[in-house]
Amino acid sequence: MPQFTIGENVRATMIGPYGPITVPEMTQITTNPNQKRVDVQTLNGVTNSVVVMRGPTGTIEFARVNNQIEQLYEQMFQAWQTGASIPTGSLTLTICELNGAQTTQHFATVTFTITDIGRYEPGRSVLQKIEWAAESFSNA
């Protein structure tokens, strides 16, 4: 499976809607809980709060080394043009903790959205960015 390292303690494995996504020069990955607090004030003036949980979201930013992201975008665009649903993928992060233990975070039913095919700046690597949203999360 394709893997890349962020620093020395995080590896990621991405399976996109059309197969493995290999990104050898990852520059940043974020994972965010997708939750919202909802406050309801009852008729007697008491405020009750509840947290509404949704699947986590995040971003993946990397230096362009080949045309794989453009090919993924083309496949997704062609599916959209024909009215087909874009299939989902998965994302797995393997984190090496400070004590040497490993934690695995698995995000399933992941929808990938390509938000930046290429950011061009003089003297710098071309950066690309994918946003993702997962329907489920597990941590081991």
Image (cartoon, rainbow, N blue to C red):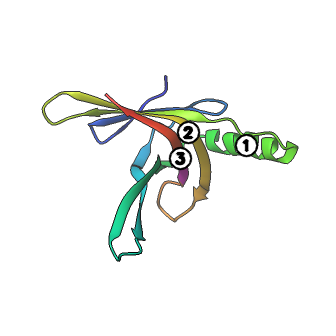
Q: How many marks?
A: 3
Which of these two is toward me, 7 or 111? 111
Amino acid identity at mark 2: Val
Residue 103 within the segment the image draws in magenta: no
In the picture of the structure, the residue carrying the numbered disc 3 is 133
Q: Residue furthest bottom?
A: 45
Give the extent of the magenta segment: 128-133
Q: At which x and y percent is residue 82?
A: 87, 43
The residue tagged with tag 3: helix, strand or loop? strand
Q: Quadrant of residue 95?
A: top left
Q: Position of residue 9 (x, y in %)?
A: 27, 37
Please tell me whether mark 2 or mark 1 is closer to you in this view. Answer: 2
The residue wearing badge 2 is: 110
Marks 1/3: CA–CA distance: 16 Å
Amino acid type at mark 1: Met
Q: Which residue reaches farthest front?
A: 44
Horizontally, is 24 left or right of 97 in the view?
Answer: right
Q: Nearer the viewer, residue 125 or 140?
A: 140
Please, what is the dominant secondary structure of the magenta stretch?
Answer: strand
**Residue sitting at x 51%, y 65%:** 122
Query: In which quarter of the view is residue 101 placed?
Result: top left
Q: Is residue 105 visible?
A: no
Residue 130 within the segment the image draws in magenta: yes
Query: Which residue is tagged 1?
Result: 76
Separation of marks 2 and 3 at Cα, in angstroms? 5 Å
Around disc 3, counting alpha carbons within 10 Å, would you say few (fewer than 14), some (14 to 19), or many (20 or more)? Answer: many
